[in-house]
Image: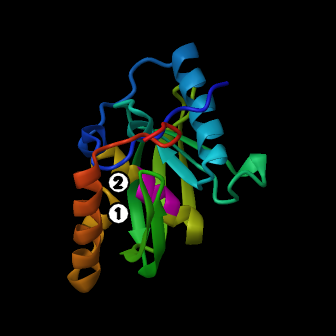
Amino acid sequence: MPVLPIRLYPDPVLRVECAPVEEFGADLTRLVADMIETMHEAPGVGLAAPQVGVELRVAVVDPTAGMDPEAVRVLVNPRVVDSAGVDTDTEGCLSIPEFTEKVTRPATVRIAATDLEGSAFEIDAEELEARAIQHELDHLDGVLFVDRLRGLRRQRARSFLRRLRANGPVSAGEES
């Protein structure tokens, strides 16, 4: 399976509100397999379809970064149905390399989604898995983790993003 190029800020696909998946089948299964391989190769703990240029509500999450194949979550048409608590921790993004910052999010989440066959399920997540899922779901709505920053953190992010915009979008793995 090929490793897909990861779209980098300021690529406009990162700001798209993705469409729900309506067709389940071989194309979706292939996309998800390629996304998992891309996520692990990067390496990362999550990847959303728009990060590889696909405007569909699909995300993969693996809080073990490839160490435990059973930990991979495939989320098709996911949505948060409940959340609780508050947690602040450092986040980064494969689409905004070399920038991290502390982000406040709910500490636990319940997610409703469908699997690759279109069967509905719910999961409860906490800690890194909850953070990664929320980060990837934001991508499906065109929201980047830097959008959640406030105060000096937001100013620092804006300065970093201005420098990225000046250099133009280049996908990870492509030569500059």
Which residue is under mark 1?
145
Across and down, in percent, residue 161 comes to 27, 62
Seen from the viewer's position, the closer of residues 86 and 103 is 103
Q: Which numbered dot is residue 20?
A: none
Q: Residue at x 45, y 80 (%)?
A: 87
Tags 2 and 1 touching, CB below 8 Å = yes
Q: Is residue 165 above or below residue 86?
A: above
> Is the N terminus in the top left, top right, bottom left or bottom right quadrant?
top right
Give the residue at x 58% y 14%. 26
**Looking at the image, can residue 92 be seen?**
yes
* Dot 2: element: helix
**Which numbered marker is on residue 138?**
2
In this view of the protein, which residue sits in the foreground, 62 or 108? 62
Which residue: 41% across, 73% down?
Answer: 106
Under mark 1, the amino acid is Phe
| Residue at the top extreme, as displayed | 26
Residue type at mark 2: give it. Answer: Asp
Question: Of residues 147 and 42, which is closer to you in this image?
Answer: 42
Secondary structure mostly seen in magenta is helix
Who comes first in sequence, dot 2 or dot 1?
2
For residue 77, say whether it is visible.
Answer: no
Write the residue at 54% across / 26% down: 31
For marks 2 and 1, give the CA distance.
8 Å
Name the element at disc 1: helix
Please rate how many residues cluster around mark 1, counting C-alpha atoms within 10 Å: few if below 14, some from 14 to 19, many from 20: many
What are the residue bounds of the magenta stretch? 132-136
For this view, does 42 lie left or right of residue 165?
Answer: right
Please tell me whether mark 2 or mark 1 is closer to you in this view: 1
